[in-house]
Image (cartoon, coloured by chain):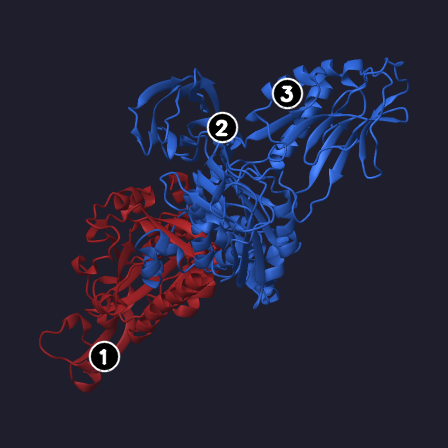
Chain colours: A blue, B red
Amino acid sequence: MPVFANPLGLLALLGIPAVLAIHFLQRKAVELPVSTLFLLERTQRDAASGRRFDRLIPSIPLWMQLLAVLLLAWFLAEPRYQKSGSVQRVAVVVDSSASMQVFKTEAVARLTQAIPGLQGEAEQLEITLLESAPRRPRIYAGSSVVEMIAALTAWQPREGLVDPTSALRLARSLVSREGTVVYLTDTPQDAVPFDAKLLAVGEAIENVGFTGVSFSNVEGTLVWRAMVRNYSDKPASRSWSLQSSAGNTEPRPVTIEPGGLITIQAAFPKNAKNVRAVLTADRFTLDDTLPMVAPAPKPLKLFTATSQAFGDLSAKLLRALDSAEPSQDAASADLSLVTYDPLDPQLPPGNSVVFVEDSTQSGAYLKGGIVAEPHPLMDGLNWQSLLVRETLELQRLPSDEVLLWQAKRPLIFLRRTAATETAPPTQQLCFNFDLRLSNAANQPAFIVCLHRFAESIREAKVAPQSLNLETGQPIEIATAPQPPVKSEALDLSGKPMNSADFGQSGAAPLTPGFLTLRQGEAALLTSAVYFADTREADFSACSTTDTLGTASAAVLERHTQPDPWWRVWILLLLAFLLVAWKYTAPSDAAPRAMEPTR
Amino acid sequence: MTLETLQIAHATALAAAGRLRLPLRSKVWRGQAGEFSGGGTGSSLDFQDHRGYVPGDDPRHINWQAYARTGQYTMKLFREEVRPVVDLILDASESMFFDPVKARRSAELFYLISESCQSVGASITIHALRGDASVTLDPAAIRTHRWLETIRALPAADPAQAPDFSRLPLRANAIRVLLSDLLFAGDPDPILKFLGQRQGTVVIFSPFLETEAHPKWAGNYEFIDPERSTRHPHRIEPATLKRYLEAYVNHFSLWKQHCRRHQTAFTRIPAEEDLSTALFREAVPAGALEGG
């Protein structure tokens, strides 16, 4: 079948009714009394009777003009025929964001409808389906539309908001400049890069969901507080209940104003598994369930070996750190607070914070500019108001990493000790001045620096912890070299999930549920994974857009060839016009409609 | 047609009648006394023959000089002088008068024939025919030009049908002059047979328009039938016009062929030309008229 490069040329077919109308009108034009009608009707009996249209059948100029109009329309429409072996490459970048779950069926249907148009007049079609999230395997690559649809149907979008630029760049490089790149999403964009076409299949649906959870201890009871948001522009009524292995609570109704946030809270059930706060389900179900575990950070044992002069500081640090507990055993402590004794310069092993204690008469204030080295412990801290008097100094090793200078004197440095066969690596944060002879205790930077160091020690500690994570959240966990860590993921109902649902390596699964990381028999991490991406839960910007259009002229020309008979059609057109003119042109001898001579 | 038009046509016909007349002398006449030699013996001054007397003969025609010489009664026979008899049959259908040119030519021929007959003292009877209706006109009405009103008022059941000649009271041994455009469907043979019966001699004058013989139609027309005043839509293509012309020629060829078979003088008179010119060119060679 030919394809028309210029379908508007078919408008020339309107000339057919025009020609017919002219012939009909022409028929009414001349009235003539004739006495020889019986002779005329004898010769023209077939045309003189019957329907009006039938009387036009014998009209040669009419048929010539109609054929000329048909040929003209054919010529103007620029018919083209398919080239054999032509291939159209199409790369479809599918929005990986979780909100696409709602519109996946519609997306599959719309893409299926659009495929013939994308193929255009090419004989073959090569389709590549990509996720908009980078570094993901292709959903499908091949030439079978059926298999492509099956792959797209089985695929699950679970990402947060993803910038499709890199995927579109990859798609464009796959199909080259001649191919077609389609971005299939639920949220239209003003401009899609890399000359991609946009196929948006979303709609602004109503959604209410959890946006986050926090925990607090109220009179010795662990209480959870969850934020619930109504993303729509209409009031929404829902009911929620707390479900766990210990049983379910009665549903409690809540009404949320348009765009409003409410907080629901309850005591966390003790000794219960699979604890979930569940909202009445809507179309977007990912944020309707909030799995929870009782948060429990890794404990940090703090050993204090300072003089009485630093007693207050040690007590403050113990109170300020979460899950910190005092320890009397230096060997089992995670962090030690020690003072430097010049008479006994040997520092204790293990992680420690070292202060200088100078009992001598106080010296002058140090002069010179205070400069912090770039280091995570120093990042963003302001030390400029720090005042330090001259005191005795720690013995600094060449391997020590100075964090803070005043002029040429190091004020704070970090000493690292490599791991040995029997001991793990350690680090010591050394304050190379006497705190009592400075205003460091009143400096926020000093407190923050201490907290950062303590938390880095806690992070490096291999110990069980319980956390509430968001889907896809990176997980940093300290592990022993051996044995290998094994993960165990359960869905919201407590059933094991497929390994494919675990998400990226080093991150929480993309599907809400429960995750446990074990090393040997010890559970290093017990966590609940919940969906709380408010950008994906907000459907107000979703709508339907289709910029696929029709195949461009360049694509059409690449896959088709022009009508090889066009010269013949032109000659025929001229021939038809000449014949019609010959029959319709008035003769020179007499007027067109013969009137009686008077 | 107006009275003035008729008067002009009459004058034209009279002028032509001075130079042309019907071929009355070529026929052997019988009947009432008149100016033409009859087929039998009569009382004219022209001697014809002698024969023996038989009882019953008029004794006034006994040739007494011959009786004196021979003693036998011998009769002198003289040529008979009779009046020609002419039946003029006028086709009064609308097609003869729908066009002013053709109507005038029809009137001129009508006047020509009637005046030609009256100038030689022929006995003329004028019949007007329109479909199945007919009327016999008073010859006196010709000079008053009221004949046209009479024939246009003829009530015909179907004015488009062929003239019904069968009801005409034609006289024996007469010249029957048919003035008709012959534009009706039908076989000429029965018409000519009827007109030629009882020793009748038939002469046909057929006026025609050039637009009937050679129309220049092209395209779509609403043809109006003058007989019935009905409208007939037609699209005329060159092929259609060609077939029409063939049918027109065949129609009159058929009449001409049958006229030849029935020894009938047949002439077609174009309406657009001058009357005398057209008659000299068409009617005289055909034997329908003869020069004075």
Which of discs 3 and 1 lies nearer the camera? The answer is 3
Q: Spatial distance from mark 2 to mark 1, Cα to Cα?
A: 152 Å
Specify the quadrant of the image occupied by residue A276.
top left
Mark 3 secondary-structure assignment: helix
Q: Which residue is mark 2?
A: A540
Q: Spatial distance from mark 3 to mark 1, Cα to Cα?
A: 198 Å
Mark 2 secondary-structure assignment: loop
Residue lying at the far left in this picture: please name it. Answer: B55
Point out residue B123 in the picture as x, y percentages from the top left corner.
25, 57
Q: Which residue is mark 3?
A: A317
B41 shown above or below A126: below
- Say what amino acid the circle numbered 2 marks: Ser
> Is residue A456 shown left or right of residue A500?
right
**Residue at the spot x=37%, y=35% of the render?**
A273
Point out the tag, 3 or 2, that comes first from the N-terminus: 3
Q: Spatial distance from mark 3 to mark 2, Cα to Cα?
A: 47 Å
Specify the quadrant of the image occupied by residue A336.
top right
Q: Which residue is mark 1?
A: B65
Point out residue B277 in the picture as x, y percentages from the top left corner.
49, 59
- Say what amino acid the circle numbered 3 marks: Leu
- Frontmost residue, A447 versus A196: A447
Q: For mark 1, does the 10 Å Cα neighbourhood hold few (<14), some (14 to 19), or many (20 or more) residues?
A: few
A446 shown above or below B160: above
- Frontmost residue, B207 versus A71: A71
- Callout 2: chain: A
Which of discs 2 and 1 lies nearer the camera? The answer is 2
Point out residue A398 in the picture as x, y percentages from the top left corner.
85, 38
- Say what amino acid the circle numbered 1 marks: Gln
The number of numbered badges drawn on the structure is 3
